[in-house]
Image (spheres, helix red, strand yellow):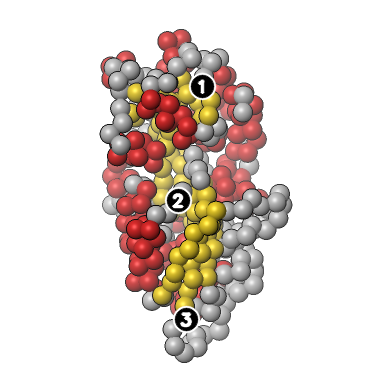
Amino acid sequence: MIVGAWLVLWTLTQPNGPPSTPPVNRSGATPSAASKATLKDMVDAARTEGELQVSWSGPLDEAVRQNFEAGFNRQFGFRLTLRIAPVAPTASGGKPPWDLLLGSQTHSAELARTGLLSSHDWSRLFGAPVQAALFDGGALAFAHQIVQPAYNAKRVPAGAAPTAWEVLLEAKWRGRLGVSSAVDVWADLSSSWGDDRASQFVQGLAAQQPVRGTPDDLEQKLEDGAIDILAAVDDRLLRRARERAAAVAPIEVHPLLLQALVASPLREAAHPNAAALFAGFLVTEEGQQLWQQYAGESSIFSAGSAYQKRLEGKQYVLAGADFSLREQPARASKYARLLGY
């Protein structure tokens, strides 16, 4: 349910003196060659690349820009400047105009299917948990977001709110339920339920005469009381609602759905070492702290993280990388049709 992409330019200025080792993976080296690079090789090569272009999920204000800039500087010793511009649409099948994607596992899988991702040994280079490496090292899951239903606390008493996914199908919610265009939610949930159960559930949602729209639009309708229930919303939108003191409350269904936030360096990126370096930075202790401050999210794979503690003892679904590559696209397309998207 990641929305709103931006192009982020990280300009890296080279310190005095040449790199101590030759640059590596500068023009789309094979995954096997990239995987042999040491962290020192990567840092030295990134000094010569000049800038890093990142497709970023969500806007960055000046304070956030400075925080990530300073954190990266401390971690790797670079001086860098961050510039932001909207992302231009990429032609189908064409090479994206950026070096690194920060987005959903679904977006990363699309790049993996077309052979656009490079490969790195994230555990060796950055100490990343092995579970975080996706698509044969082509991408790195650096954080997770929880997706669950939510209700308007002024219109729905807490005791009357749904307590399970299936309760959303009760007749009393007909016409008062929002179902967003982020249909990947139901595809990911089907990795646990199976396609038959998920299809029946989505058909039931469609029969509820739901209000349709983007996740942001429907969250606003929920705050305004135009709908009583939002079938699925990610915790980033819920966090923003809480900051506004909106009467919006999450529903603790079982299982909760987790979606990975993934850093995906392009195989033939113009600035491949800088791209991999920033991806790895996001799983360092400081990178995790910065992302927690920015989005209120962290990785369930990182020991002691806020999200790992939050999910202790709870049931949740996290779609695997193989599922994202194979079954997910067809199921998402099917569920979109069922819901009228």
Q: Is residue 84 above or below residue 252?
A: below
Label whose residue precedes the other's in the sequence (1 or 2): 2
Instruction: Give the amino acid type for the residue marked by disc 2 in the picture.
Output: Pro
Q: Which residue is mark 2?
A: 59
**Circle 2 — which element?**
loop
Q: Residue furthest top?
A: 171
Residue visible at 30% across and 27% down?
247
Instruction: Give the amino acid type for the residue marked by disc 1 in the picture.
Output: Val
Q: Residue furthest bottom?
A: 17
Instruction: Give the amino acid type for the residue marked by disc 3 in the picture.
Output: Gln
How far, Cα to Cα, is label 3 from label 1?
53 Å
Residue 176 in view in this figure: yes
Label whose residue precedes the other's in the sequence (3 or 1): 3
* Image marks 3 and 1: residues in contact by CB distance under 8 Å: no
Any mark on residue 14, and which? 3
Residue 117: horizontal and vertical position, in percent? 61, 59
Residue 45: horizontal and vertical position, in percent? 52, 78
Residue 284 in view in this figure: no
Residue visible at 51% across and 64% down?
9
**Circle 1 — which element?**
strand
Q: Is residue 53 above or below residue 308?
A: below
Local packing at callout 1 (Cα closer than 10 Å; few below 14, some 14-19, many 20+) is some
Q: Which residue is mark 1?
A: 211
Label whose residue precedes the other's in the sequence (3 or 2): 3
How far, Cα to Cα, is label 3 from label 2?
28 Å
